[in-house]
Image (cartoon, helix red, strand yellow):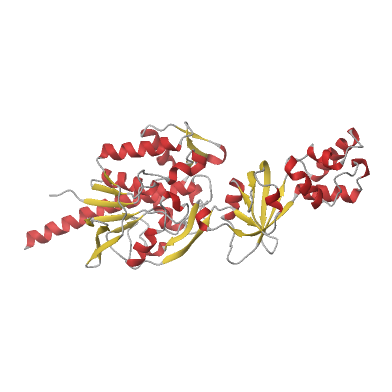
């Protein structure tokens, strides 16, 4: 009896996990990847350190998935973060947990995660082919192979794990959406999530390159309702705002329907009273100092001219001449520095893609398509995305595992069915 065959399209996180899981479940596996290296996008996750999951429960993961989290319940419960951590430690990648439960390799090198997966694929005898899939072969309503430039590669089952459309340079060019649409799937229009934000003005450009640590960022909608608030790091850029806090905030915005304002608390450790006391103390120490020199003791130098304008205080005013109203404006701006947001950057600048293949058309247990038997889906090509902190890679591992096992099981059942019908004839 010939070995069952599974073809996996896409050599990213979900695809590699699907290939290894299908092999472990008894299938012979071919992995197709157009890039010369597997896991190109993994190299840039977590600033090149690879934040590969979050040290939390399955429930904790689902709470960090704003859309369609129920669809992932089965996959994440069966392969939760604890199992993912065990899996990578067993592959020889020691892990550590950092702030917010983020899990990284101890080496801080994404390459170690990719190498471990690559050698595991090699040991398993998975065939890795550098080839771009052009489409799916369908016979009698079932997916039976993959169309390549040099002909059709037959398959007992196909796992589609081509990623989204963010970071096209890594190979995620949205090919998978077209293949899924061809066999009848609905594609929820892809858009960027975890994406930098553009300012509706030019304040940020004047502070381009300035990075702030330990600030509190609050994002409010048109109705002044807070939709996101967190403390951490951020960055001013030529177009607006970026950095971890801003990427997280972006996932909470309903950009098609609402507009947002960001408030930055530059001194979260001091309430307004304590901040005023500190300012008065600093003034008393050098009463004749010019305002702009005084501000350099409180803020990064690049912010000083902008802050002076915001608070409407002349740069050369001696600080002992500051009125109570001027002090008040300065404190208000330091506790809530306003940036009005025009909208998110284009999807190609996003870390991940929201949107993709509609979850209602996929079996959540096996990840098999309800539209085309024999097709299994994994990772970012599906309409699921999460906040930052390792949750998006956790989705890739969990759905990859479920799709790989589902595909191997499907092939086994199809072959048993074929054998039976041959015996009958």
Q: In which quarter of the view is residue 286 placed?
A: top right
Q: Position of residue 235 (x, y in %)?
A: 64, 46
Q: Is residue 170 left or right of residue 20?
A: right
> What residue lies at 28% left-to-right and 53% top-to-bottom?
407
Q: Position of residue 328 (x, y in %)?
A: 85, 49
Front-lying residue, 302 or 186: 302
Q: Quadrant of the C terminus?
A: bottom left
> What residue lies at 37% left-to-right and 57% top-to-bottom?
364
Front-lying residue, 392 or 259: 259
Q: Position of residue 107 (x, y in %)?
A: 47, 31
In the picture as drawn, the residue positioned furthest to the right comes out as: 321
Q: Is residue 308 left or right of residue 5?
A: right
Count of numbered badges drawn on the protein = 0
Q: Is residue 267 visible?
A: no
Q: Is residue 305 above or below residue 414?
A: above
Q: In which quarter of the view is residue 294 placed?
A: top right
Q: Position of residue 110 (x, y in %)?
A: 45, 38
């Amino acid at each position: 009896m010939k070995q069952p065959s599974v073809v996996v399209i896409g050599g990213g996180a979900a695809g590699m996990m699907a290939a290894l899981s299908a092999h472990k479940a008894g299938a012979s596996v071919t992995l197709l990847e157009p890039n010369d290296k597997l896991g190109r996008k993994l190299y840039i996750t977590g600033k090149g350190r690879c934040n590969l999951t979050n040290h939390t429960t399955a429930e904790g993961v689902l709470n960090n998935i704003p859309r369609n989290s129920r669809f992932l319940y089965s996959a994440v419960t069966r392969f939760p973060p604890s199992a993912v951590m065990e899996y990578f430690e067993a592959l020889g990648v020691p892990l550590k947990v950092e702030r917010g439960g983020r899990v990284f390799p101890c080496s801080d090198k994404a390459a170690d995660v990719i190498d471990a997966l690559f050698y595991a694929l090699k040991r398993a005898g998975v065939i890795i082919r550098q080839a771009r899939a052009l489409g799916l072969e369908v016979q009698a309503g079932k997916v039976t192979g993959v169309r390549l430039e040099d002909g059709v590669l037959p398959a007992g089952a196909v796992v589609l794990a081509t990623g989204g459309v963010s970071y096209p340079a890594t190979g995620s060019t949205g090919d998978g959406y077209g293949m899924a649409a061809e066999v009848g799937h609905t594609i929820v229009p892809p858009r960027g999530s975890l994406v930098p934000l553009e300012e509706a003005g030019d304040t940020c450009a004047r502070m381009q390159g300035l990075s702030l640590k330990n600030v509190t960022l609050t994002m409010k909608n048109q109705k002044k309702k807070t939709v996101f608030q967190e403390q951490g790091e951020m960055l001013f850029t030529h177009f607006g705002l970026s950095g971890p806090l801003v990427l997280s905030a972006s996932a909470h915005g309903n950009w098609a329907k609402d507009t947002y304002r960001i408030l930055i608390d530059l001194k979260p450790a001091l309430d307004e009273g304590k901040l005023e006391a500190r300012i008065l103390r600093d003034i008393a120490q050098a009463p004749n100092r010019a305002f702009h020199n005084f501000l350099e003791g409180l803020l990064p130098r690049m912010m000083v001219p902008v802050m002076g304008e915001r608070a409407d205080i002349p740069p050369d005013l001696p600080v002992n001449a500051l009125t109570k109203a001027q002090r008040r404006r300065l404190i208000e701006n330091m506790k809530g520095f306003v940036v009005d947001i025009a909208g998110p950057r284009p999807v190609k600048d996003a870390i991940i893609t929201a949107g993709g293949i509609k979850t209602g058309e996929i079996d959540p247990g096996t990840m098999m398509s309800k539209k085309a038997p024999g097709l299994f889906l994994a990772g970012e090509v599906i309409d699921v995305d999460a906040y930052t902190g390792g949750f998006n890679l956790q989705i890739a591992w969990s759905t990859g595992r479920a799709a790989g096992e589902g595909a191997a099981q499907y092939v086994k059942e199809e072959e048993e069915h074929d054998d039976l019908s041959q015996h009958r004839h």
